[in-house]
Amino acid sequence: MKLSRRGRRLATAHAPPSGHVGLAQPRRALQLMRDVRRLLGARGQNPTQSLPFTIPPRYAPMSLVLLAILIGALLPVQAGVNAQLRLTLGHPLTTAFASFLVGTIALGLLLVVARTPLPAPRAAVHTPVWYWVGGLLGAIYICGVIVLAPRLGAATLIASVIAGQMLASIVLDQFGWVGFTQHSATPGRLLGVALVMVGVRLVQQ
């Protein structure tokens, strides 16, 4: 496996004058192994280690929640932008295709900039068919939002979407479907979903 330019510099900096790491320098050898392992991406790492910034371990859970909230805040913005794009393009399907096309181009550029290696062809061949359904579900969501956003408004639309997500999430967690870890539908969880439903009703008024 080839090291990046940064990895080669790091390895050179840790290497002893003789060109190899011997028993006389166990600490330097251990540090070199740790640095290379970090650069190559060790398995079993903390979820926050894959982020482009460092989060102290004690703040990691809340930081990830806040990041999820920030991403969720983009949904009503996306809905409004796509609704306006429909006024120009004229049809929900055309608008959804354009939206996905822009996203595909953006991801392609990101792959090039990040120098992300492409998966082996055999990985796609041996992947279960239902793993590819995510793109179809995304297309259904985008088309539905484009149609519903002008009629419901941002608050009612997103509240209704969240209610649907909570109902589906309870079922998926209860049975451990589609790769989720099994979590029982406790009274507290069911109460939380009920409160979300009440919130949807209040937002509609």
Image (cartoon, helix red, strand yellow):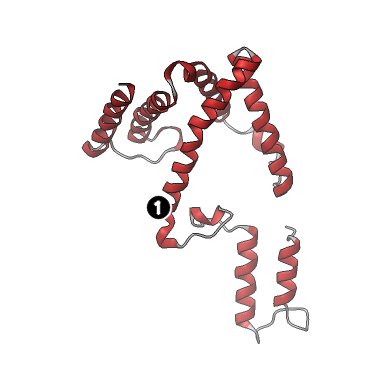
Q: Amino acid at mark 1?
A: Met
Relative to 195, residue 113 above or below: below
Q: Quick one: SS at disc 1?
A: helix
Give the position of the N terminus as an image quadrant: bottom right
Q: In front: 19, or 205? A: 205
Q: Quadrant of the C terminus?
A: top left
In-image side of 48 versus 115 (left or right): left
Question: Of all residues shown, which one is farthest toward the top?
Answer: 90
Answer whether residue 15 is visible to the viewer in this image. Answer: yes
Question: Crowding near pointer 1: few (<14 within 10 Å), some, many (20+)?
Answer: few
Task: Mark yes or no: residue 130 visible.
Answer: no
Which residue is at 72% across, 40% downward?
A: 109
Q: From the top left corner, tell me how far across and down residue 46 is, in percent.
A: 49, 57
Residue at position x 44%, y 42% in the image? 69
Q: On the image, numbered disc 1 is attached to which residue?
A: 62
Place of residue 30 in the rendered image (x, y in percent of width and height, measured from the top left): 60, 75
- Residue 134, quarter of the rendered image: top right
User: Is the residue 193 above or below the residue 148 in the image?
Assistant: below
| Residue 53 in which image quadrant | bottom right
Eyeballing the image, is 185 above or below 153?
A: below
For residue 155, side relative to residue 109 (left or right): left
Q: Is residue 179 left or right of residue 4?
A: left
Looking at the image, which residue sits at the far bottom?
24
Residue 158 lies, in percent from the top left, at: 42, 28
